[in-house]
Image (cartoon, rainbow, N blue to C red):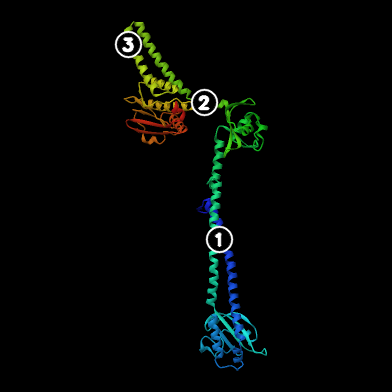
């Protein structure tokens, strides 16, 4: 996910979002609880100071002294004794004129009370206030002192310094902080666990990646030449690409497919049967209003459970045309033409020798030709077990001789026979185009030689084609695999492109090296199990 210039993963976004919510919730809760704790602490301290003040105000020593009946200094002695015992900062007893009778600092006794918040107490009220006195800012509680007849004779002020109140509040809040920290830790861990679970559900993909995959999937479905139709377990069509719609229109059927029952619009596809039987059906012909289709049907499995079925189909006529192009029929025909031409030349030579009666020379010629042919056939048969590829190589060797080029075949191991026809077609495409390119390269060379090396191991098939041409100019090497690129005119430049495509379809690699002494193309292909056992 992108926010401004910053890019965040889904896990980070979820974690950040949940952590933000947790932090905000805990912050608000902490503030509210903290304020409540501050008020409760101040109230508790105020009540404590009020209780001390009331006790002092009821003391006979204080009442009698304020009435002038007690001993001098009795109030100071009593007040300091209570102050030290209770831990308050000061206990000040004053008369109705606001003159102190006690104070932690004896020098302040006899002077007027400082703070200007004692007025209501002198009129008989009990209360708590915060004011600045001679000892600093303090929380102070005022209680009137009354004699036995209920007459007010003075006021008691008990004070707690503000810093002590704040210290008490801090102690209470310090108990709250670990709880907030623990809640935050739990929230972060929960956010991480939630983000991890969401990522697992989404197979580790980011939202942008999911959107891109959906776009790519749609693009791929619309770019293929096959019609694709998918149904769910209930037999409703959930997917139909553009090619499927085109073929249905071509067959005169409705192109409104999505959401409808497949059995109603395309009953011959029998997709509901595939869902029920989990059957896989390959390359079956299907007639649809005069249009012949080649159809493959397969169940859609998720975690070994059938969730639907898929049909991939194509117009058989188009498939036939494509097959003719891909199987290299033209390449076979050219190679056979060269072989036929070579045999015709040999027959003309034999016929001429017969007509002039050179039977001894004829016998030697036939024996030499036969030995050479057997040697050539034997080397091909030893290195290549696939009859199609072997026959193709023999015809290519004949075509090379016809052009005055020496085509040498060497190798290690035996190139196997493949049970898959399309694999053989790919081999023929690769070998044929590479040899044709080599023949083209040595056409003007002084030494016209081509080396074809075939190697086969249990895991890999390799072939290389080397020529003695002048090499590929450096400025052209980057573009030799570009479709249509050629220095030989129009309608050329497709050979190496076809080679590259065939190598990619077989899962192999293709590379080349080129210099003044010639060019070598190397192809490495993985060997399939069926090929190993053949």
Secondary structure at numbered mark 2: helix
- Residue at left offset 54%, top offset 61%: 182
- Residue 14 is left or right of residue 414, and the answer is right
How far apart are labels 2 and 3 at the CA level?
Answer: 45 Å
What residue is pinned by disc 1? 183
Q: Nearer the viewer, residue 524 or 443?
A: 524
**From the viewer's perspective, is residue 106 above or below residue 303?**
below
* Crowd rating for badge 3 (residues with CA inside 10 Å; few <14, some 14–19, many 20+): few
Q: Residue at x 38, y 8 (%)?
A: 351
- Residue 443: percent from left, percent from top: 36, 25
**On the rendered structure, is 109 left or right of 350?**
right
Q: Residues within 10 Å of mark 1 (few under 14, many from 20)?
A: some
Circle 3 residue: 364
Image vertical order of residue 103 relative to residue 281, above or below = below
Q: In terms of depth relative to the viewer, which is nearer, 331 or 272?
A: 272
Are the residues flagged by discs 2 and 1 in contact, CB closer than 8 Å? no
Gap between marks 2 and 1 measured at Cα:
68 Å
Q: Which residue occupies 33% across, 9% down?
A: 363
* Mark 2 or mark 1: whose residue is earlier in sequence: 1
Instruction: Give the secondary structure at mark 3.
Output: helix
Q: Kindly indicate the quadrant of the structure image that contains residue 403.
A: top left
Q: Quadrant of the C terminus?
A: top left
Seen in the picture, residue 528 relative to 366 is either above or below; the reply is: below
In this rendered view, identify the residue nearer to me: 391 or 301: 301
- Please report whichever mark, 3 or 1, sits nearer to the chain's N-terminal start: 1
For disc 2, the neighbor class at 10 Å (few under 14, some 14 to 19, many from 20) is: some
Kindly report the distance in space between the C-alpha atoms of the residues bearing marks 3 and 1.
Answer: 103 Å
Residue at the spot of label 2: 323
Q: Is residue 101 visible?
A: no
SS class, disc 1: helix
């Amino acid at each position: 996910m992108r926010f401004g210039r910053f890019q965040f993963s889904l896990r980070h976004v979820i974690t950040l979002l949940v952590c933000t919510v947790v932090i905000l919730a805990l912050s608000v809760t902490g503030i509210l609880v903290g304020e409540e704790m501050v008020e409760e602490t101040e109230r508790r301290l105020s009540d404590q100071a009020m209780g001390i003040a009331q006790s002092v105000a009821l003391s006979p020593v204080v009442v009698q002294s304020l009435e002038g009946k007690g001993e001098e200094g009795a109030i100071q002695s009593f007040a300091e004794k209570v102050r030290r015992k209770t831990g308050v900062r000061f206990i000040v007893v004053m008369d109705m004129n606001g003159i102190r009778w006690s104070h932690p600092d004896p020098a302040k006794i006899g002077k007027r009370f400082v703070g200007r918040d004692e007025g209501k107490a002198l009129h008989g009220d009990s209360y708590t206030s915060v004011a600045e006195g001679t000892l600093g800012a303090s929380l102070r509680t005022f209680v009137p002192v009354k004699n036995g007849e209920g007459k007010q004779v003075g006021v008691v002020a008990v004070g707690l310094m503000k810093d002590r109140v704040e210290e008490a509040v801090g102690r209470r809040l310090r108990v709250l902080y670990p709880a907030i920290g623990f809640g935050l830790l739990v929230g972060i861990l929960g956010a991480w666990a939630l983000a991890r679970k969401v990522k697992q559900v989404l197979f580790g993909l980011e939202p942008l990646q999911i959107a891109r995959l959906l776009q790519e999937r749609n693009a791929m479905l619309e770019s293929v030449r096959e019609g694709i139709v998918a149904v769910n377990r209930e037999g409703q069509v959930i997917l139909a690409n553009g090619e499927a719609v085109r073929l249905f229109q071509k067959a005169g059927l409705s192109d409104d497919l999505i959401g409808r029952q497949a059995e109603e619009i395309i009953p011959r596809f029998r997709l509901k049967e595939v869902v029920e039987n989990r059957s896989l059906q390959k390359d079956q012909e299907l007639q649809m209003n005069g249009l012949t289709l080649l159809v493959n049907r397969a169940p859609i499995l998720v975690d070994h459970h059938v969730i639907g079925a898929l049909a991939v189909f194509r117009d058989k006529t188009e498939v036939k045309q494509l097959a003719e192009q891909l199987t290299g029929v033209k390449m076979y025909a050219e190679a056979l033409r060269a072989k036929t031409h070579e045999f015709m030349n040999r027959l003309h030579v034999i016929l001429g020798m017969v007509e002039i009666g050179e039977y001894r020379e004829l016998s030697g010629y036939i024996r030499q030709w036969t030995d050479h042919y057997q040697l050539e056939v034997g080397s091909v048969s030893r290195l290549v077990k696939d009859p199609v590829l072997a026959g193709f190589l023999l015809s290519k060797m004949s075509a090379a001789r016809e052009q005055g080029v020496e085509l040498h075949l060497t190798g290690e191991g035996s190139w196997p026979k493949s049970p898959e026809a399309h694999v053989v077609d790919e081999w023929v495409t690769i070998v044929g185009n590479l040899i044709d390119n080599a023949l083209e390269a040595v056409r003007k060379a002084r030494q016209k030689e081509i080396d074809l090396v075939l190697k086969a191991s249990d895991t890999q098939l390799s072939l290389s084609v080397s020529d003695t041409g002048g090499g590929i100019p450096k400025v052209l090497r980057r573009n030799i695999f570009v479709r249509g690129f050629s220095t030989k005119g129009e309608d050329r430049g497709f050979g190496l492109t076809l080679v590259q495509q065939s190598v990619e379809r077989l899962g192999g690699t293709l590379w080349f090296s080129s210099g003044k002494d010639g060019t070598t193309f190397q192809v490495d292909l993985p060997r399939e199990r069926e090929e190993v056992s053949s």
